[in-house]
Image: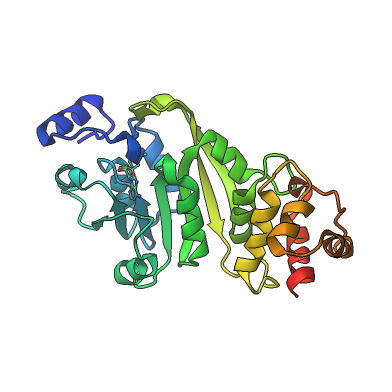
Amino acid sequence: MELTDIGVIKDLFSRHGFSFTKSLGQNFLINPSVCPKIAEQGGCEKNVCSLEIGTGIGVLTKELALRSKKTVAVEIDRTLGPILEETLADCDNVQIVFDDIMKLDLKALFSEHFSDEEVVVCANLPYYITSPVIMRLLEERLPIRSLTVMVQREAAERICAPMGSRECGALTAAVNYYSTPKRLFNVSRGSFMPSPNVDSAVIRLDIAKDRKYPQVIDEKLFFRIIRAAFSQRRKQMINPVSSELKIPKEELSEKFAKCGIKPTARPEELKMEDFVALYAEIFG
Ligand code: SAM
């Protein structure tokens, strides 16, 4: 069954009485070249397990299952159940978990389904939760080798921007803290049904095996600095950081100077090492 064929999709929908829920970011892939590329460039191999977020009708799920040892897919929309039973009938290494990826106990999911084996995550993410899903998967320090996700093109640009560049934001910093981001390829809006108003891109985040910045003992405090600094991206960061941490500006300015950071610096001018040095100066 060709799951990118519009005739096949319409037939599945009408037989199972399915209709799209826009608020769940349901834009299904209909370009046949995209899913195999996500699975291959996402590192699916016969000795590696894969996790998908958001199955839709199973178009990517199938490609992941074909190439990996075992695939677990989390889908919020139970009305897709009967369709998936049909489309994934031949895949005996797939398990669908009907739940909300934002509420699910991920550590429990990993130990139940993957016995703590290494996992690659591949997903055409629902756009309304792109950043929180990425952040959750990174912050929980799960045994994930890489995260290969389709995101809006603008988000791909922001996430993959080098630190110290104008496009950089708090999400860029978080992604760079935990991983090495890489932009893989673009996907046009016509590759989806229904077609969204924006183009997309697939990115891969290669998760660092060991902590990239072991000097950061308390990540919560570190990210308080990052979030405050980027809360006014184009403005001098000393003001929001001073009020967030309740450190007088003069005192903070001295700490900035010790780290070689100008008191007038904007967050987009700082490299990750500068943030790490500032964290150590303030909390070390
Ligand atoms: N993988 C399919 C494809 O490429 O055609 C579907 C991708 S579609 C952009 C996003 C999918 O994520 C939808 O099936 C939607 O129901 C599901 N979804 C939305 N919010 C979710 C959530 N919080 N947890 C799990 N799945 C979710």
Q: How is the image coloured?
A: rainbow
Q: Residue 25 appears at what percent x and percent y?
A: 36, 38
Left or right of 256 in this view: 215: left
Q: Nearer the viewer, residue 254 or 207?
A: 254
Give percent across and percent down for residue 139: 52, 63
Q: Position of residue 65 (x, y in %)?
A: 30, 52
Name the residue rendered at 57%, 42% in the picture. Answer: 183
Left or right: where 95 falls relative to 187: left
| Quarter occupied by the C terminus | bottom right
Instruction: Specify the quadrant of the image occupied by residue 95.
Output: bottom left
- Find residue 29 and report its horizontal and vertical position in percent: 34, 34
Q: Quadrant of the N terminus?
A: top left
| Residue under the image location 72 percent in, 39 percent down | 166
Q: Is residue 159 above or below residue 213?
A: above
Q: Is residue 139 left or right of residue 3?
A: right
Residue at the (64%, 55%) spot, across then down: 227
On the question of residue 41 being in view, the answer is: no
